[in-house]
Amino acid sequence: MKPFFQAGWTISDIQHALDWRTTPGLHGRESWGPLPQHDRENQSYIDHCRGLRAAILHRLNLWRTTTGEIMLSKSQRAAAESTQARAAARAAAQRHATRAAQRPAHQSAAATGAAMARAALAEARRRNHN
């Protein structure tokens, strides 16, 4: 598990990887079944530990690319999507403010003042996020 933690994964990400497949399995299921349980009557504790280790490694290794690189974890993907959404919102607000500031001068003083206020607010938000 050390390589996953070194790649920035959290304990919650490891739990997610152990519970969920990267893609649906053979029967369309996205979740794994439970990890192997120790059968005290038919299995030694050492054999159970070996089987459990193999199951954990198998599930985690499916979160690697074909070249062996560790994929982005659930929390890393969520953070990247959030960052992209914020950047898109800032860009849209900036475009809107720029268009509003470039409108013809025949607008009323109130409309012009409101457009300038929106542009100033957008600029202030942009500065605070950078």
Image: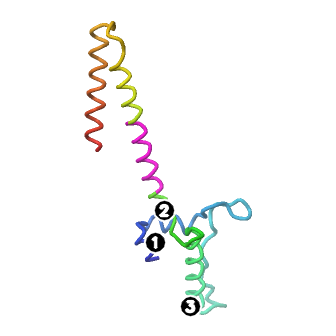
Q: Is residue 66 above or below residue 129?
A: below
Find out whether residue 7 is within the magenta segment.
Answer: no
The amino acid type of the residue labelled 2 equals Ser
Q: Is disc 3 placed on a helix, strand or loop?
A: helix
The amino acid type of the residue labelled 1 equals Phe
- In the picture, the quarter occupied by the C terminus is top left
Task: Kindly identify which residue carries mark 3.
Answer: 45
Task: Kindly identify which residue carries mark 2.
Answer: 73
Q: Is residue 101 above or below residue 121?
A: above
Task: Kindly identify which residue carries mark 1.
Answer: 4
Find out whether residue 81 is within the magenta segment.
Answer: yes
Q: Residue at x 28, y 10 (%)?
A: 110
Task: Give the mark nearer the N terminus: 2 vs 3.
Answer: 3
Q: Report the span colored magenta.
A: 77-90
Callout 1–callout 2 Cβ contact below 8 Å = yes
Callout 2–callout 3 Cβ contact below 8 Å = no
Question: What is the CA distance from the residue labelled 2 to the residue labelled 3?
Answer: 32 Å
Question: What is the CA distance from the residue labelled 3 to the residue labelled 1?
Answer: 27 Å
Q: Nearer the viewer, mark 2 or mark 3?
A: 2
**What is the x, y in percent for residue 24?**
67, 60
Question: Horizontal placement of 7 versus 52: left or right?
Answer: left
Task: Give the mark nearer the N terminus: 1 vs 2.
Answer: 1
Q: Which quadrant of the figure has residue 122?
A: top left
Q: Which quadrant of the figure has residue 43?
A: bottom right
Mark 1 nearby-residue class (10 Å; few <14, some 14–19, many ≥20): many
The amino acid type of the residue labelled 3 equals Tyr
Q: Is disc 1 placed on a helix, strand or loop?
A: helix
